[in-house]
Image: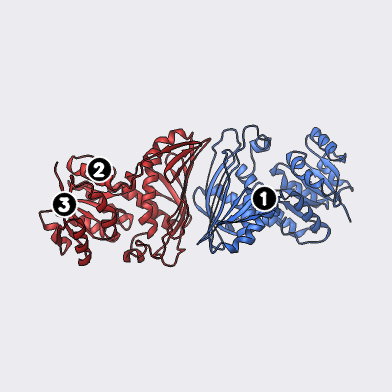
Chain colours: A blue, B red
């Protein structure tokens, strides 16, 4: 089996705690051949962890080498677009952490670029690979006439939280700060269950001092299939998440490790989605599978929800006007 | 103690099931001296129930009699404004079931009229007399920095429901049908706890075939004190109501018969508010108490929320623009 030779760019939290644990289980498909990081020390520590690949002093040098087939970008969000562009120019495939970009307008460049290049641009949205959401989608038929969907998410990052303390998250250049950074996951999950979102009306707020940018959002929206949604999220306040689909006479609840429809319970295999996303990336690059789950347009649609939410201030924003 | 001589106008569900049980306990303050109803049979049955007061063939005759100090109007909503106007013209005090009117514009006439007359116009909003909401308000201090308020209400009227089968509710002339008819109670409660609402963005829908007019509403809104709200209500779908106030580090929940703040529980005396509202009306008429809880302007503000919600379609409506 052909192994993809991967250059990891950015050796921060995402590379170490999210991508590497997945790649470690996929050594038949991927070989980490190169790393680079703005912070030399991060690159060295990470290289040590992952089996001593070559450390490049710069992204440009890594891209110019012939020991890399694809780059894995785990960077501050504002670097995604220029780094993807550079990789494509140098003929490398790309897997890049979500969100696609700081804002919809610059994200569109990547959607366009992905149509013009024969290289793969794969936006890594691990929630599009989480099995429980597909089970919810499958069980939706059992909720007679879904009318309403509510998701209240209480992330509750404390002052010591590693994400909260990332420099680029403290002074976010990406629209909505934590709201889009964490939120694209939620919207990806909603969209895979219910389909496209037609419009959103939202209000955002900064509630917690130590978090950079806004950290609270509440919204109403409508899916194209007519289901109405409420999505409320706080990155600073703690609590039990609530996920509920209300039909005319049945309800579906997603609780920690099961799905409940009235009195019936359905179990699922819990997964984080990182391993599956790298497997999918491999299939897209090596076996020409269609890039559905890592499609830049899908990632752009997830982001559009938050750009709309940020500018909404309680007004309706039709998502098509942004895309 | 002076007894107020009351003429009850409209002998339907509200008169029989809501007002009369309260008045029965207040025979030291009220005497039902007259009744009238469009349906003669209703008037007769009701008269029998309440101790055989005089039955008038018409509202006009009842108003012209000198055995009535005040009228209690329990009528199809579209009759509230003209019937209040007639009563005031004839020098009678009025207590009138909520909502004040079919829409804000015509409701304003009553607000104006109440400033010009020395007779009392009291809009009966029994939820403004329900004790548990005042306890919530009192306990709000214990929720450090309230940020967010969520109320999901599932009224779940079945096909046999007495309200659902009222003719004027089946073909509602009042804005939003059930949404305003039942909803003014909810907004009255919210406003007494948090104060004025600045704006609302909402979406409404007809979900249930056998209910007249729209029966589902979901909304976001902001109180003038900065607290953000989600209010979702269905008159056709059944479920457990949820009432939750989220602060930075504490939560208040109002469950069936108690208020819970984290692990602390607070009990309250349950009341429907009808008795208290008639007692208050009595104080306003007889002892010149200021009409705060039955004020037409308060009732108009409750109604304005729903007029805004109906026209919102996901857009922000600032409530001041309606009032």
- Left or right: residue A176 versus residue A23 is left
Same chain for marks 1 and 3? no
Towards the viewer: B223 or B279 = B279
The disc at residue A106 is 1
Q: Residue furthest left?
A: B66
- Residue at numbered disc 2: B291
Q: Residue at x 24, y 53 (%)?
A: B20
| Discs 1/3, front | 3
Towards the viewer: A172 or A126 = A126
Q: Tell me residue A248's x, y (percent).
A: 50, 62
- Residue at numbered disc 3: B92
Label 1: which secondary element: helix
Q: Tell me residue A68's x, y (percent).
A: 86, 48
Same chain for marks 3 and 2? yes
What is the CA distance from the residue labelled 1 to the residue labelled 3?
Answer: 68 Å
Q: Residues within 10 Å of mark 1 (few under 14, many from 20)?
A: some
Dot placed on the residue nearer the N-terminal end, 3 or 2: 3
Q: Is B36 placed above or below B288 here?
A: below
Label 2: which secondary element: loop
What is the CA distance from the residue labelled 3 to the residue labelled 2?
Answer: 16 Å
């Amino acid at each position: 089996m052909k192994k993809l030779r991967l250059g990891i760019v950015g050796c921060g939290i995402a590379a170490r705690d999210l991508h590497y644990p997945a790649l470690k289980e996929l050594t038949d498909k991927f070989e980490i051949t190169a790393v680079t990081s703005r912070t030399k020390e991060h690159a060295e520590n990470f290289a040590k962890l992952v089996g001593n690949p070559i450390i490049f002093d710069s992204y440009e040098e890594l891209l110019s080498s012939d020991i890399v087939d694809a780059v894995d970008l785990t960077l501050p969000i504002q670097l995604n677009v220029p780094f993807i562009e550079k990789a494509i120019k140098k003929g490398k495939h790309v897997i890049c952490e979500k969100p696609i970009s700081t804002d919809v307008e610059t994200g569109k460049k990547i959607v366009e670029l992905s149509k013009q290049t024969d290289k793969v641009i794969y936006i890594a949205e691990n929630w599009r690979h989480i099995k429980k959401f597909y089970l919810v989608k499958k069980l939706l038929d059992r909720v007679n006439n879904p009318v309403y969907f509510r998701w209240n998410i209480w992330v509750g990052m404390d002052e010591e939280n590693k994400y909260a303390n990332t420099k680029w998250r403290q002074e976010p250049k990406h629209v909505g700060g934590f709201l889009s950074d964490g939120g694209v996951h939620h919207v990806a999950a909603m969209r895979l269950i219910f389909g496209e979102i037609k419009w959103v009306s939202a209000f955002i707020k900064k509630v917690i001092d130590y978090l950079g940018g806004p950290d609270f959002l509440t919204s109403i929206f409508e899916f194209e299939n007519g289901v109405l949604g409420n999505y409320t999220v706080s990155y600073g306040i703690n609590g039990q998440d609530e996920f509920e689909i209300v039909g005319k006479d049945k309800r579906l609840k997603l609780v920690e490790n099961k799905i409940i429809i009235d009195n019936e319970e359905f179990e699922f295999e819990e997964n984080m989605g990182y391993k599956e996303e790298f497997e999918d990336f491999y299939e897209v690059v090596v076996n020409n599978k269609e890039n559905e789950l890592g499609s830049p347009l899908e990632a752009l649609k997830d982001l559009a929800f938050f750009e709309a939410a940020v500018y909404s201030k309680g007004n309706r924003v039709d998502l098509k006007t942004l895309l």
